[in-house]
Structures are given as structure tokens and as C-alpha cells.
Amino acid sequence: MINTKEKSGSRRTLEKFMKNPTAVFGVVVLLVMFIMAIFAGQIATHDPLEINPGDRLMAPGPAHWFGTDRMGRDVFSRVVYGSRISLIVGFSVVTLTSIFGTFLGLVSGYFKRLDEVIMRILDGLMAFPGLILMIMIMAVLGRSLVNVIITLAIVYVPRMARVVRGAVLVQKEQTYVEAARAIGAGPMRILFVHIPRNCIAPIIIQGTMIFAYVVLAESALSFLGVGMPPETPSWGVVISSGKVFLRRAPWISFFSGIAISLCVLALNSIGDGLRDVLDPRLNRKG
Amino acid sequence: MALVLLVVSITIFIVMHLLPGDPAAIMLGPEATNEDIAVLKAEMGLDKPVWIQFVDWTGRIVRGDLGNSIFFQNRSVPDVIADHLEATLLLTLFSLGLATVIGIFSGVVAASTHESIYDRGFMLLTSMAVAIPNFWLGLMLVLGFAIMIPILPAAGYSPLSQGVWSCLSYLVLPSITLAAGAVALIARMTRACMLDVLRNDYIRTAKAKGVRQSFVIFKHALRNAIIPVVTVIGMSFANLMGGAVVTESIFNIPGVGRLLIKSVFTRDYPVIEGVVLYIAIAWTLINLMVDIIYTLIDPRLEY
């Protein structure tokens, strides 16, 4: 599939992407997050779950860089381990939405009859503010990592499906589809081989955006107490645990918020950068 | 619209009744015996076939019978929701007003000073506003303006009947918290659309014939740039309703959002269903209103 000409094209795209300072900033921040998540055991100075009643609510200092929470747990270590939760949830949800969303989008973009049915169902799912739907599903499923991933995937699949459907509607009118049909390619081959190759750009862009939403949504659910279980070192849980001690120990909530903001900012910058490079028509920077 | 509502109610039904998880067992808690669960199941009609449950359920919804709350001493769900409506309505409307005014104004200024320092600062600030989680922003605002500089109440709510000013003072921080993300979205959309419109010939003509700059921007350009902005404002309203859940939890505001979270914790299934249905209906109505507003702003549009 990849010939030399295409390779040089993607290299040019990469070069263009790397010339955008905000996108590069995003990549660097995200890389740091990855390293933090993978080597959390080495980077963290303490066990994120270790309870130390003697050290409770200590201010940031040399022993505890980001201070400690009400059970004497080290906030720095909890923030470092929090990157794991956010990235695991983010990746899982993006993978699930890319698979199911792309499939639904392809099918409904290509077959008019199925389009009516699939789109009505997805419209129904999108007729709820995302967070409300998530809270309702989590209320039924209960708090756990897997349930958070399932819930977020249910909520974000329609958003991916819509984007892919839009792309398919454009692509299926293209000459290459006509050419494929003329040389005898069946609808399945056109739908699952020819068209998807040309829909990869919007899927990547939308996937990055969904990743950012997911990081925010997971932390919001965990903050509200309907996401990750209470002992997990998730950024949302950590912020929530500091809420009551805002006056005495503001550091508990402070650092996790910075981590979430940086992570989302990085993902959004990468998404914008990719959009500028991959899909110049959507460029809204003016 | 009727179709959307049907799909919405089917979705709620599927989530609440068909997902793994036994509402009767969850509602009674871990100490319940199997007989207790069976009795409650029969009472709730959960022992009947699924399609009969669905017909029963839609029948009740259409008649406006959302059942009784379990936590609030068997009061009817619409009553319970009505008690919590004022705070949420005031909070979302206040935030939407704030977001619209600040968003459009700053977006217009950024577009008319394109590529200046203000414009660059604007882009940076709006990127940050989208990335910062609103619950964290809320806590930091409380830390800043209620704890370090104690000028505003840290949490709570004062009903409108107790006086407008005290009500407003309780709403300032929550509204800023809730509006931040929407301000950024509206402002960016305004800026982008204004930049598109300002390139048009008729703008150059207007400037050339000596029309005042502010008149060109607000009268000639903004009116033509506003349609996509209205869409974003409508979308923001939905996000605000979702965000209100978070904001109400931070500031302990007795609104519909906190009711939803409380009901999740007390396993008050009828209230959860009711609140979600109300919000979905509100969201659908808002979409309809946005469509109507389009035709008011731009008479060229027809449906």
C-alpha cells in the first residue's frame, strides 16, 4: 500500500506539522505524560496508596513535593499515577470509538436505508448533554475502570460516527469509487477497503479531539463520585478529595488540575495542528 | 422532534432497565433478602416481559406520571424536580448571558485587531479556558475570591425570594465557573466568522464611503457573522446544563444537577429517570428555539 511517493508525502506532512510551535508543544507535553504513565513506579517518590496518618495535610516541601492529603498520602505520587488512569481511559475509549464509530459511519454513509435507522439512534444518544448521559449510565453500571471506559465509549461513538459518515458521503461520489466499481469491485470491497483509506484524516483528527474530551469527562465523573472508585489515584478523585480541605490544604486539588489542563491543552493543540496539516479546508485560523 | 423524544425515552429505558444491574437489588442495598427483592420487583413491574415494561413505562411518561421519589418520602418526581428548578434555571441563564456577551464582544475585538498582541493573547486564553476542567476552576475561584480575598460567598444558594442582591452574590462564582468554557467557544467562533466576513467587498465599500469603524463592525459585519455563533450558543446551552451538575456540586447549590448526583448516591431511580428526561426534553426544545432564532436573524433562511 505504501509506495515511495506516498512516503515522501507523509514526510512532508510531518515536516509541516513540526513547524507549528503549538503542535510541537502538545507533542512534548503528551510525551512527558506518557513517560510519567509508563515509568510511574520509578518517578513517584512514594506508594500512591500508602496511608500515613502521621504525615496528614503536610504542605509541599522536600519530603513531599506536592504535599500530602488527609490520609497522609503523597500527592505528587498520586498525580504521577493519575496520568496512567487518564491515558488508559483515553486510549481505550478512542480505540473503541474509532472501531465502532468508523463502522457505523461507513455503513450509514454508504447505505441510504440503514442511514435513516442508524442516524436516528445516534441522534437519540446525542440528544442528551454528554455528562448527563454518562452519569445515568454510570449510575446503573457502578464505579469501576471498565465501566468508565464503556460509558465514555457509548457517549462518544455517535460523534465519531457522524464525522466518518460525513466523510463517506463525500468520498462515495469520487471518481476513484466509480473506477473501482467499473473494474468490478463489490460494495463490500469499496466500503471497507477503498473508502476507509481516504477517511483516515478525519478519523485521526476526531480521535485526538475525543481523547481530550475523555480526559476531561473521566476526571469530571471521578470528581462527582460516579467515575473511578474512591481509592484510585485518578486526577478527578484527587481533586475531589481536596475539596473539603481547600482552606487548610489547597495543594491537594491544585496540582491535579494543572495536570489535567496541560494534558487537555496538549491534546487540543495536537488536534488543531493535525487538522491544519491533514485537512486544510477545515482551517479556521483565518 | 417527536421522533427524537421517542428515541430519547427508548434510550433512557434501555439504560435504566436493560443494562446489567438489578435496580431492585441496588435500591434495597446489600442486606436485602431474595424475597424482599422479589416483592419490590413485582411492585415495580420488573418481573414482567421487557416489552410490557416498555409499554407501561412510555404510557406513564406520556401521562406525565414519572413515579414517586424513594428518597424524598414518596413525593412525586415532577414535584421534587420543580423544587430544584429555580437554582438551575438562574445559574444556566446567568451563565449563558455572561458567555454570550463576553464571548461575542471579545471575539469581535480579536477579529478587528487581527494578529495584534490582543489577538494572540485572546487565542492563548481561549485555548486555556477550553482545557481547564470547570470543577477545578471553580475550586480555584473559591480559593481566590472566598478564602484568600473573602468578598464572595464560598458556597450555597439564596433563593430569589430572599432578595435579588444576595441571590446574585451567590451566583457570581458559579456562573463564571460554568461560563468559562462557553465564553471561549463563542468567542473563537465569533472571531473566525468575523474574519471571514471582514474580507468581503461590501465591508471595504462601507469603509471606503466613510462609515464609522464601529458601525461597520457591529452593524455590517456582525449581523452576517452571527448565524454560526448562534449555533454555538445553542450548543453551549446544552453543555451548560451538563456542566451545571458539576458546578452545583462544587458550590452546594440545591439545583437539578445536584439532585441528579444525590439520587445516584441514594439509588433513587425514579428521580434519575425523571431528571434525565427533563434535561433531554429541555435540550430538544432549545434546539428548536435556535432554529427559530435563525429565521429571525436572517430572513433569507426558510424551513
Image (cartoon, rainbow, N blue to C red):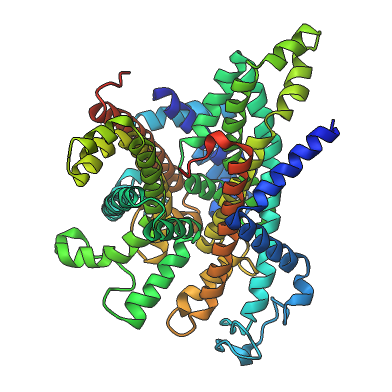
- Which picture quadrant has residue A38? bottom right
* Residue closer to the observer: B180 or A247: B180
Q: Quadrant of the N terminus of chain B?
A: top left
In the picture provided, is B15 more to the left or to the right than B193? Answer: right
* Residue closer to the observer: B206 or A100: B206
Depicted A138 relative to depicted B169: above or below: above
Residue A226 in view in this figure: no
Q: Residue B24's x, y, as percent?
A: 56, 47
In the picture provided, is B261 more to the left or to the right than B88? Answer: right
Q: Residue at x 31, y 37 (%)?
A: B226
Q: Residue B180's x, y, as percent?
A: 39, 57
Residue A126 in view in this figure: yes
How many dots with numbers? 0
- Which picture quadrant has residue B172? bottom left
In the picture provided, is A242 more to the left or to the right than B280? Answer: right
Q: Residue furthest front?
A: B208
In the picture provided, is A230 more to the left or to the right than B109? Answer: right
Q: Residue at x 39, y 37 (%)?
A: B196
Depicted A110 relative to depicted B222: above or below: above
Q: Residue at x 27, y 21 (%)?
A: B300
* Residue closer to the observer: A221 or A171: A171
Q: Residue B253's x, y, as percent?
A: 34, 62
Q: Quadrant of the C terminus of chain B?
A: top left
Q: Residue A100's x, y, as percent?
A: 68, 34
